[in-house]
Image: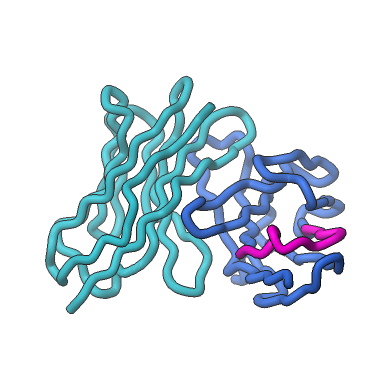
Amino acid sequence: NAGVTQTPKFQVLKTGQSMTLQCAQDMNHEYMSWYRQDPGMGLRLIHYSVGAGITDQGEVPNGYNVSRSTTEDFPLRLLSAAPSQTSVYFCASSLKPRDRGSPLHFGNGTRLTVT
Amino acid sequence: GNSVTQMEGPVTLSEEAFLTINCTYTATGYPSLFWYVQYPGEGLQLLLKATKADDKGSNKGFEATYRKETTSFHLEKGSVQVSDSAVYFCALEGGATNKLIFGTGTLLAVQP
């Protein structure tokens, strides 16, 4: 039972480079989301999706793009990396967006460093 | 808007000590409240939750009670173990889109 799988685990980029962080879940969850974790700031929501073909912005969306072409996958794209995007990124999913109290299932994170 | 405030860490305790990590929230309506735990090198895992006032969530010896009158959801454990060393996040969910808002996290270090 894989749950939420994130790749890569570690990545170093130079300023201006682009990359895609991958996230896949095998639990048939409708809701998927991306968070970034920074010291002293907890987790902040970047983008989320309530189903295939539907995405929306979270708290800190600037500099990131997402798409949701399938239920299973929710990639996060950095088009032009900046040092301010150095962080640990977590993908999380849950069964149904409106299921009150439905817990989020997290991947193990991607540690990104932008130099 | 909705927000969560939790006590800053690190919290350092000896094994078998009593643990309290404070969490207060600001929200409209009736949010659901959660505690998540993050062990080193891993993602967050749900520890416990409460979805309405006066509910008590419990798991692995940890407890938290949803107190609407004090807008609090403090985490407690009667006797901590070294294996409880982790970062603990209080979180709130409100609104129609299942957005979870997290506190800044509290690092707990339990020494043998």
Above or below, A12 against A80 in this view is below
Q: Nearer the viewer, residue B66 or B107?
A: B107
What's drawn in magenta, residue-wise? A76-88
**Is A69 included in the stretch rendered in magenta?**
no
Q: Is residue A81 magenta?
A: yes
Q: Which chain is blue?
A: A
Q: Quadrant of residue B23?
A: top left
Q: What residue lies at 85% left-to-right and 44% top-to-bottom?
A: A53
In percent of width and height, residue B40 lies at 44, 73
Residue occupying image coordinates x 30% and y 34%: B72
Query: Quarter of the image holding residue B105?
Result: bottom left
Q: Quadrant of the C terminus of chain B?
A: bottom left
Q: Position of residue A14 (x, y in %)?
A: 80, 73
Q: Position of residue B84 (x, y in %)?
A: 29, 68
Looking at the rendered structure, the number of numbered marks drawn on it comes to: 0
User: Residue at point 77% right, 58% down?
Assistant: A76
Q: Nearer the viewer, residue A79 or B53?
A: A79
Is the residue A21 above or below the residue A98 in the image? below
Q: Please give left or right for residue A114 compared with residue B70 in the image.
A: right
On the picture, is A8 further left or further right than B2? right
Q: Position of residue A65 (x, y in %)?
A: 82, 51
Q: With B19 as the anchor, is A64 left or right in this view?
A: right
Q: Which chain is cyan?
A: B
Q: How is the image coloured?
A: by chain
Q: Residue at x 28, y 69 (%)?
A: B109
From the viewer's perspective, tell me whether residue B68 is left or right of residue B18: right
